Image (cartoon, grey):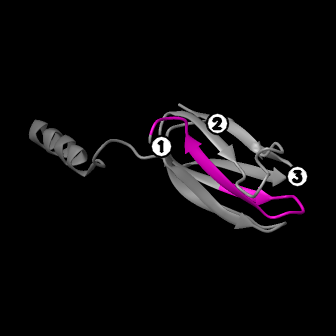
Amino acid sequence: MKTLVVAAALLCVAVAPAGGETRDPGRVQVVANEFHLLPSRYVLRAGPTIVELVNAGEDAHDLALRRVAPDARTVRIRVVQPGQLARRSVNLRKGRYDVWCTVAGHRSLGMRARLVVR
């Protein structure tokens, strides 16, 4: 009986996912309107994340996201027309992120936000 219990325990270890447990991706929705961005949350967990841009305004808007760090790359969500949405999957690292609309002049008019990833 003892051998059977040990064998069952070894079998459970053998089929466990490599690298530990997995989790569903995080999510953040950013609503764009003239002339501000409103994220659904300002603090996120590091890891796979779905970023969604919803255009609730009257003008076309897009979204750029960049970690505040040397040599960080900018992730972009394409231009979205009024009433539409677009989403993109990204892998967020810990740190602060600037988020803004890259359409000419929109950032300077207030279409920017800051997110924190922990």
Crowding near the residue tagged with mark 2, few <14, some 14–19, many ≥20 C-alpha atoms within 10 Å: some
Label 3 sits on residue: 34
Position of residue 2 measured from the top left corner of the image (x, y, whole percent): 12, 36
31 to 41, vertically: above or below: below
Quarter of the view holding residue 84: bottom right
In terms of depth relative to the viewer, which is nearer, 96 or 105?
A: 105
Judge whether residue 32 can be spotted in this image. Answer: yes
Residue type, mark 2 in image: Leu
State the CA–CA distance, disc 1 to disc 2: 15 Å
Q: Earlier in the sequence, mark 2 or mark 3?
A: 3
**Label 2: which residue?**
115
Q: Nearer the viewer, mark 1 or mark 2?
A: 1
Please name the residue that numbered disc 1 is placed on: 72
Magenta residues? Answer: 52-70
Q: In the rendered view, does 66 fall on the left or right side of 59?
A: left
Residue occupying image coordinates x 54% and y 37%: 45
Question: How far across and down, in percent of the image, does residue 56 sit?
Answer: 85, 58
Q: Amino acid at mark 3?
A: Glu
Disc 3: CA contacts within 10 A as few (<14), some (14-19) or many (>=20): some
- In three-dimensional space, the C-alpha distance between marks 1 and 3, rounded to whole angstroms, equals 28 Å
Mark 2, secondary structure of its residue: strand
Give left or right: position of 76 versus 24.
Answer: right
Question: Residue at left 59%, top 38%?
Answer: 97
- Sequence-wise, the earlier of marks 1 and 2 is 1
